[in-house]
Image (cartoon, rainbow, N blue to C red):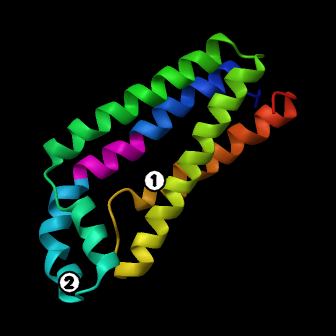
Amino acid sequence: MPELELYNVIWLFVVIFMLHDFEEIITVEKWAKAKGKKVKLHNNWIRSKIWSLWNISSYTFAKRDIFIFLFMAIITFIKALYLESYWSSVLFVSFLIFVLLHNLIHILQTLIIRAYTPGLYTAILLVTPYTVYILYRLRDASLI
């Protein structure tokens, strides 16, 4: 099987990340209704903060996510446009590291509240492996 061109690998990240956002948008409202009592039952600060992040409607979550999507799309566009530029690599890799931290937060939230949190599955199965793959491809192309 032929390897994707780096340009295409970078653009495919937008699709992979949006699948993650879709999982969050689709599940957030139902999750909040189902898990609210369990999360609020343990009256501690960290669970309250987690609850405040996820206790919103899908519509509100989608409105918030549009800004993340636009930010990510602009950074990806810049990287694709200036593929071999050092500054575009710094910008893009910084965003990829942010995404990996975001995925780690999904895992930590799940461990803290001892229940699935919206976006967990795609964070683990799609976004994290693909982000690591992009970092590998950038390193292999001597762009980081």
x, y percent for residue 59: 14, 42
> Which residue is pictured at 77% across the width and 35% down the height?
137
Extreme residue in the front direction: 45
Question: Which region of the structure is painted magenta?
Answer: 19-26
Which residue: 33% across, 50% down? 23
Q: Residue at the far bottom: name it.
A: 42
- Seen at 76% across and 16% down, the residue is 85
In the displayed structure image, the side of residue 34 where residue 14 appears, left or right:
right
Q: Residue 24 in magenta?
A: yes
Instruction: Name the quadrant containing residue 41.
Output: bottom left
Q: Looking at the picture, how far across and down is residue 117, in whole percent?
A: 34, 66
x and y percent of residue 49 in the render? 29, 69
**Mark 1 crowd level (few <14, some 14–19, many ≥20, 10 Å Cα):** many
Quadrant (top left/top right/bottom left/bottom right) for the N terminus: top right
Mark positioned earlier in the residue sequence (1 or 2): 2
Res. 6 in view: no
Amino acid of disc 1: Thr
Q: Is residue 47 visible?
A: yes
Query: Dot 2 corresponds to which residue?
Result: 38
In the picture provided, is 40 more to the left or to the right than 139? left
Q: Is residue 118 one of those drawn in magenta?
A: no
Closer to the camera: disc 1 or disc 2? 2
Residue picked out by circle 1:
122
Q: Secondary structure at mark 1?
A: helix
- The number of discs equals 2
> At 67% from the left edge and 36% from the top edge, which residue is drawn?
93
Q: Position of residue 68 (x, y in %)?
A: 38, 35
Q: Amino acid at mark 2?
A: Lys
Q: Quadrant of the C terminus?
A: top right
Residue 143 tag number: none
Question: Left of 126 or right of it: where is 133?
Answer: right
